Amino acid sequence: MTILVTGGAGFIGSNFVLDWLAQSDEPVIKLDALTYAGNLENLVTLTGDTRHTFVKGSIDDFDLVAQLLAKHQPRAVVNFAAESHVDRSIHGPEDFVQTNIVGT
Ligand SMILES: NC(=O)c1ccc[n+]([C@@H]2O[C@H](COP(=O)([O-])OP(=O)(O)OC[C@H]3O[C@@H](n4cnc5c(N)ncnc54)[C@H](O)[C@@H]3O)[C@@H](O)[C@H]2O)c1
């Protein structure tokens, strides 16, 4: 079986993936838009690890998410994708609404 982790390049998501793969061989598909908060360096220790696959994209891309669900048939989706920097919501609430509500 496989799990789909969204926001897997962020603070919580990347630590979840590292912890998951430290104790399970269940493959992980990571979907992350790599916004200002996403950083693939968080997962550099997994380079070459065939248990994980990274996909760059947004959770509000319906077609992409549908395609990933159909292809990998994950038994669970763990959603960490978020606009989490509250200060930024004052300057630009649109991204917060789009990711934290519509996309989620
Ligand atoms: N950090 C904490 O201490 C903490 C505590 C409790 C709950 N949370 C919650 O956990 C979640 C993740 O928090 P975090 O600290 O890891 O945030 P973060 O900002 O470090 O990571 C968010 C990740 O989501 C990605 N992302 C943003 N928009 C996206 C989109 N539309 N599609 C796909 N990926 C997208 C970013 O690129 C980034 O990798 C949030 O919901 C947050 O509220 C965090």
Image (cartoon, rainbow, N blue to C red):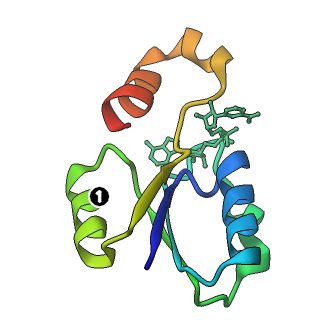
Query: Label 1: few (<14), some or many (≥20) within 10 Å?
Result: some
Asked whether residue 51 appears in the rendered view, the answer is yes
Q: Residue furthest top?
A: 90
Up/down of 101 relative to 77, above or below: above
In the rendered image, which residue does mark 1 sit on? 65
Q: Quadrant of the N terminus?
A: bottom left
- Residue 88, quarter of the rendered image: top right
Please report the residue visible at 74 percent of the width from the left and 76 percent of the height from the top: 23
| Of residues 17 and 83, the one drawn nearer to the viewer in this rendering | 17
Cβ of mark 1 under 8 Å from ligand 1: the answer is no
Q: Quadrant of the C terminus?
A: top left
- Residue 94, quarter of the rendered image: top left
Asked whether residue 10 appears in the rendered view, the answer is no
- Residue 36, quarter of the rendered image: top right
Pinpoint residue 9: horizontal percent, then vertical percent.
63, 56
Pinpoint residue 22: horizontal percent, then vertical percent.
76, 76
Which SS class for mark 1?
helix
Pinpoint residue 91: horizontal percent, then vertical percent.
56, 12
Please report the residue visible at 70 percent of the width from the left and 47 percent of the height from the top: 12
Please report the residue visible at 56 percent of the width from the left and 80 percent of the height from the top: 26
Pinpoint residue 63: horizontal percent, then vertical percent.
20, 57
Please report the residue visible at 44 percent of the width from the left and 29 percent of the height from the top: 100
Ligand 1 position by quadrant: top right
| Of residues 53 and 39, the one drawn nearer to the viewer in this rendering | 53
Q: What is the tally of numbered marks visible in this picture?
A: 1
Q: Is residue 2 left or right of residue 84?
A: left
Q: Amino acid at mark 1?
A: Val
